[in-house]
Amino acid sequence: MFVLRGTVVTMAYDGAVLPGGAVYVGDDGLIAAVTPLDAVPAGFENAPRITAGGLIYPGMIDLHNHLMYNSLPLWTEPARKVPWTSHNQWGGAPTYSSRISQPARLLGAAAGRALLRYVETRAIVGGTTSIQGNPRGAVPPDNDLVRNVDSEKLGTHEDFIRVSTLVADDAAALAPYAGAVAAGRGFIAHSAEGSDPKLRSEFRLLEDVGVVRPQLVAIHGTALNADDFSAMQAGNSSLVWSPFSNLWLYGATADVKTAHAIGVRLCLGSDWGPSGTRNVLWELKVADLWNKSEGVFTDEDLVRMLTSNPGDALTEVWPRPVGRLERGALADLIVVRRTAADPYRNLIEATEADIRLVVVGGRARYGLRSLMTPLAPAATPITVGRLSRAIDYGDPSVSWKTVLADLEKVRSNPTAAATRAAAVFEALVASGSSVPADSFVLLPDMPAPELSDDALTRAAAPGPVVVPPVEPLTTGRAWFDAVDANPFHHGLLSGLRSYAS
């Protein structure tokens, strides 16, 4: 247990901000008190008292991602001169397999544990404490670096959430999900991704099978209109907005102005490396850029999209609240250096350099060495851009250097890696199990057009695969230059460079 002192941005319903406040974090991974709102709890008399040196916020929740692909660079199809209109199109582009699905699949098969640690590190350096989008295959434990929304059990044996990445095209395919929702489980589903109005039928199918309820989290919804948002609001469902990916691929994004006016709960998600931001902290900046021209949201509204709003969506199915700093909530929180007078503008304008501490489940996992040392003495050094930080992977044999070394082993010799991975998959087929007991294998959750369904369990990669160097953890000049080169967003995303200056 420990006490973290500073200005507490609670994200409570009343928007309370507590200068000179304190968050009491218990050994059970929960918030025991937030003063001066609550009385000081018993048992904290000798707990370490840490001066945050910044603003204390709830940890950020990224409610839409595809983690397996986040070591890859931004992708455009060279021959494509106009935006796509549907999610059904770009998976068949000429370079999609060689540049996205094949390298991701090889890394997932040959270095799955290192790949997941890399993408979680990339998330946590931006202040993310919970992230959606686990790959298929091996399931990470609850005590990994960040909470994995899809598989998080919160110390129970419950399976709280179902996920559908590829869109179902008939009611029969959705029947298992409808049954889960009826039993109180959560359902995270891609729906109506693209600009083609015909994609609205995907959401109507969700309505038809009865899953437009509080447990539904619909991802993208770029083709939806006011009637759809009214149905979503009536069901108290949530919509995840991924403006960067939408603009990158389709040149348009969801009609969040109408959704907000109707009262739909809006959340943010950074999607994936090939068409998304580094982390949800940068997706917040995309939302801010969009909002500067549209004037729909307050700064507090935007910050709620990655704290209390997704927290409320998850609390529909999780037994503990998250996304707010309040007594009894999960002790997921971050400390951010103060650079702006307004606490919400402060987070919007923050970059990775401003993240001072990240706590997940009451455990300090990443931050300044001065803050990590008293809370996590076993944490190991990590260099993030030009920053010196410390990180705790929960395993003394693991460091940032070993993570990078495992990934580089695959990149430098993909043929040997494919041979090793093929042997694992052959053992998988022979045993009839989903994942070999002694392996941590990640399988793709996005289209892999070079494979038939059953071939996923037969080979790690077909033929030579070029694995690009892993992307830097921080958002920098090369990434901004790549953003500038894509005309689909009509220059809007080029404004992201200003947040790094």
Image: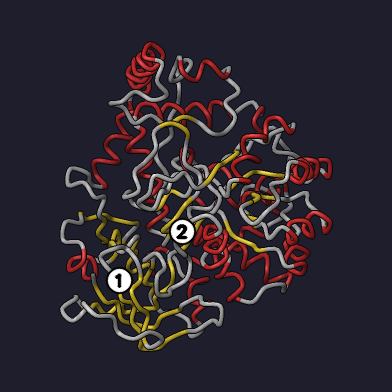
Q: Quadrant of the N terminus?
A: bottom left
Question: Earlier along the polypeptide chain: callout 1 or callout 2?
Answer: 1
Q: Which residue is mark 2?
A: 319
From the viewer's perspective, is 241 left or right of 359?
right
User: Disc 1 marks which residue?
Assistant: 25
Q: CA distance from mark 1 to mark 2?
A: 18 Å
Which residue is located at x 43 percent, y 65 percent?
A: 59
Q: Residues within 10 Å of mark 2 (few under 14, many from 20)?
A: some
- Nearer the observer, 341 or 234: 234
Q: Residue at x 50, y 20 (%)?
A: 456
From this view, report whether residue 194 is shown above or below residue 231.
Answer: above
Query: Would residue 293 appear left or right of 349 to someone viewing this image?
Result: right
Residue 204 spot, x, y in % from top left = 79, 44
Which residue reaches farthest top? 430
Foreground: 339 or 186? 186
SS state under label 2: loop
Q: Nearer the viewer, residue 176 or 1?
A: 176
Would you place residue 279 above or below residue 76 in this image? Answer: below
Specify few, some or many for label 1: CA neighbours under 10 Å numbering under 14, 14-19, or 20 or more: many
Looking at the rendered image, the disc whose residue lies closer to the viewer, 1 or 2, is 2
* Mark 1 in CB contact with mark 2 (< 8 angstroms): no
**Position in image of residue 150 (x %, y %):** 48, 45
| Circle on res. 166 | none
Amino acid type indicated by mark 2: Pro
Closer-to-camera residue (97/163): 163
Q: Position of residue 346 (x, y in %)?
A: 48, 76
Residue type at tag 1? Val
